[in-house]
Image: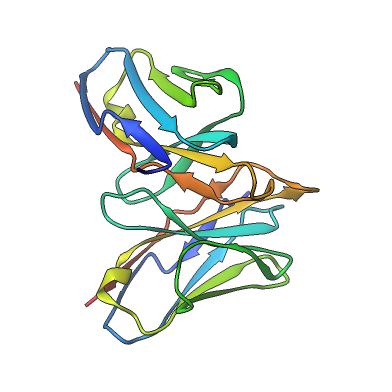
């Protein structure tokens, strides 16, 4: 049973470019959350997707957008990249049961470097 | 002030020592998570607590809801325990599916 997978592992972009990161949730999970972790800091919540819709969002600008597909996989898109977007981007999947979300399982992350 | 504070910031221990890592939070929560992050980024969920105490192998996690405080204990520490330990909380008022708010994490180094 595959856990949460993310691609690519590493990515280098230049300022102003756009990037798409991908996440496949753990088998049986239907909810995907995205986090940004700057060096030396704890992860910061970007947004969460459930039933192909953005259910909750953190304090990130509109340059950060996402999508969830019918197979529950998800993409994180960042437009007009800034140097400060350099970080580890973590995806976490979980199962929503009624009003409750079960334990989140984290992927290995995508390391984005913006030059 | 951050909603989640962890202490100490960094910790170095000798193999075999008993280690305690603390987490304090300032909001009402529905659950608290202890996570382990190894170099390279992968995060593993160690515990999810809403009350009391949980034990898994050499790891013990406790939470005091009234004091808004949790501790992660490692008994008989080993160099393979070297990692960043992160505390994260899920707060009330945002629904059961709310986001996690993370502490900055504590870097633990266990010397052989």
Residue beneath the point at 40% across and 29% down: B23
| Residue B60 position (above or below residue A55) | above
The residue lying furthest to the right in this view is: A98
Foreground of the two, B9 or A23: B9
Residue B6 x, y percent position in the rendering: 34, 33
Residue beneath the point at 42% across and 83% down: A79
Residue A39 x, y percent position in the rendering: 27, 55
| Residue A56 position (above or below residue A42) | below
| Residue A63 position (above or below residue B40) | below
| Residue A7 position (above or below residue B104) | below
Residue B2 in which image quadrant: top left
Question: Is B111 positioned to the left or the right of B36 in the image?
Answer: left
Question: Is B96 positioned to the left or the right of A67 in the image?
Answer: right
Q: Quadrant of the C terminus of chain A?
A: bottom left
Residue A111 x, y percent position in the rendering: 34, 63
Count the marks: how many? 0
Residue A107 x, y percent position in the rendering: 49, 54
Q: Which colour scheme is used?
A: rainbow
Foreground of the two, B70 or B80: B70
Residue B43 in which image quadrant: top left
Residue beneath the point at 38% across and 64% down: A9
Residue B31 in which image quadrant: top right
């Amino acid at each position: 049973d595959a856990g949460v997978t993310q691609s690519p592992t590493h990515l280098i972009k230049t300022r102003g470019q756009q990037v798409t990161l991908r996440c496949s949730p753990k088998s049986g999970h239907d909810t995907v959350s995205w986090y940004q972790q700057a060096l030396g800091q704890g992860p910061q919540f970007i947004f969460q997707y459930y039933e192909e819709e953005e259910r909750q969002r953190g304090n990130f600008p509109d340059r950060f957008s996402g999508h969830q597909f019918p197979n529950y996989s998800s993409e994180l898109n960042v437009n007009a990249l800034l140097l400060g977007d350099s970080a580890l981007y973590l995806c976490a999947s979980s199962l929503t049961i009624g009003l409750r979300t079960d334990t989140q399982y984290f992927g290995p992350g995508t390391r984005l470097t913006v030059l | 002030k951050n909603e989640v504070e962890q202490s100490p910031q960094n910790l170095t221990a000798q193999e075999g020592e008993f280690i305690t890592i603390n987490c304090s939070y300032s909001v009402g929560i529905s659950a608290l998570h202890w996570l382990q992050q190894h170099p390279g980024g992968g995060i593993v969920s160690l515990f999810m607590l809403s009350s009391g105490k949980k034990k898994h192998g050499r790891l013990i996690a406790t939470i005091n809801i009234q004091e808004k405080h949790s501790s992660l204990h490692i008994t008989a520490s080993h160099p393979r325990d070297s990692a960043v330990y992160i505390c994260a909380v899920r707060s009330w008022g945002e629904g059961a599916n709310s986001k996690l708010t993370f502490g900055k994490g504590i870097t633990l180094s266990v010397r052989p």
